[in-house]
Amino acid sequence: MSDSEELEIELPLQPEILKSISSACLWIGLGTLKYSHLRILSVIRKYAAFIDAAGGNLTYEDLTESFGIEPSNAVALAYQFDGLENMAGVLPIIIELEEYLPHPRNDNIVLPLFVALTVMTTIAVALRMWSRYKVAGSIQSFDYLTGIAYAMTVAWGAVAVYHSFSNGPYSAFWDMSWDTLRRHYRINFTLNIFYPWVMLFIKMSLCVFYYKMTALWYIRWGIWATGAVTVGNTIAGFFTPIFSCRPILYWDHLLEGPCKADRRMATIIIGAIYILTDIAIWALPMPLIFQLKLYPRQRILALCTFGIGAIACVASGFRLDAVIKFYNYGSEGTSTLIIDAWTIIEMNIALLCACAPAVRALVIYYAPKMFPNLFPAPTKGSSQDTKTNEPGNTKAGSKITSTAEKV
């Protein structure tokens, strides 16, 4: 068993083999706490050298005396490999395949994304608040929701940045130590239970905004339905990682099989519902735009303004794809940093979408003053003058137009 042909291994290593090696590294790292500070592949190398010196044999006494594993954990560790004999055969094979293992590095994308998008979002939120004060005359409930959502988004992103630095340079389990993996699980758990609440405040700020923007019954019913689904999905997204494994800090007890629920399927379903609510929130204002009394160019600009939400839907889709790959393990699926990156994009784009209408209103308010030659003042009696100077018109179309101009 000294070469790849005798092992009947196809090169490059197939995803199924990489997944099996990742799982073996996870069990060895967790079980051998004596060497939790070492790269897991180095720990496996110690096992392989010991097994080779012992003539290919491995006993429970060897695990407890030579590797410092507690007796109960020794039995559980051997069980994960379908017995000591199989464990003694698998670990040396992993070392023989070491030169063929890929060593993917963690891309340093979380920090640049966080900085760039936070700057953009900060400017957008500031302009939104100024627009609400200057154009609409007051800051309302949905503006406060946006402010809270902004603060939570920044906090989530800051934790994600810390996560990116604490994960180390490599993303595959065999290149990490158990101390690093344990820290990864802890921070990832924090991000997972925090994420639903950030998305709740972002989406509810949009729902309340749309609700106050129109009196059309079918849009308001759509808003109620979307809001209810969002709240329910938030509760599910918060409690699923908490109660799907017992104890809650499951990563320290993986050998005991603490996770009875299908966390992968639950996470995928919750993520899919998030995408559906993203699409619903993006589509809700579209009928309203066609109710507005706008010139064709203004209508197109309004559609583009609200259409920013479509980008958030795309980001949600890529985030869900990254989550699915993580649960599949393998050399590319053991890192959640790509999930963090797509989540930062999703949150900030959603916030930009929430701020876009107010920023547009601010531009419309200041444009005639800054560029008088491009935006001449409307003459008395013109249709534009009539629309903008009769906010008290009781007709539905005029009321919608006036409200839209304010927000």
Image: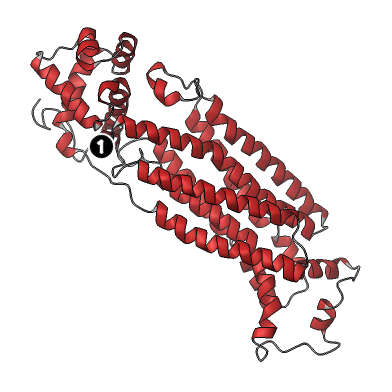
Q: Secondary structure at mark 1?
A: helix
At a point 22% along the width and 37% down the height, the residue shown is 13
Q: In the shown orientation, is residue 22 left or right of residue 183?
A: left
From the viewer's side, name the closer residue of 292 and 37. Answer: 37
* 85 vs 203: above or below: above
Q: In the shown orientation, is residue 168 left or right of residue 388?
A: left
* 367 vs 334: above or below: below
At a point 68% along the width and 89% down the height, the residue shown is 372
From the viewer's side, name the closer residue of 31 and 269. Answer: 31
At a point 42% along the width and 48% down the height, the residue shown is 161
Q: Is residue 296 visible?
A: no
Q: In the shown orientation, is residue 242 left or right of residue 283?
A: left
* 352 vs 376: above or below: above
Q: Position of residue 74 (x, y in %)?
A: 29, 12
Q: Position of residue 329 (x, y in %)?
A: 35, 35
Which quarter of the image is occupied by the N terminus? Answer: top left
Q: Position of residue 342 (x, y in %)?
A: 46, 50
Which quarter of the image is occupied by the C terminus? Answer: bottom right
Residue under numbered circle 1: 175
Here the colouring is secondary structure
Q: Position of residue 331 (x, y in %)?
A: 30, 39
Crowd around label 1: few <14 · some 14–19 · many ≥20 (10 Å): many
Q: Amino acid at mark 1?
A: Asp
Residue 6 image-quadrant placement: top left
Residue 52 image-quadrant placement: top left
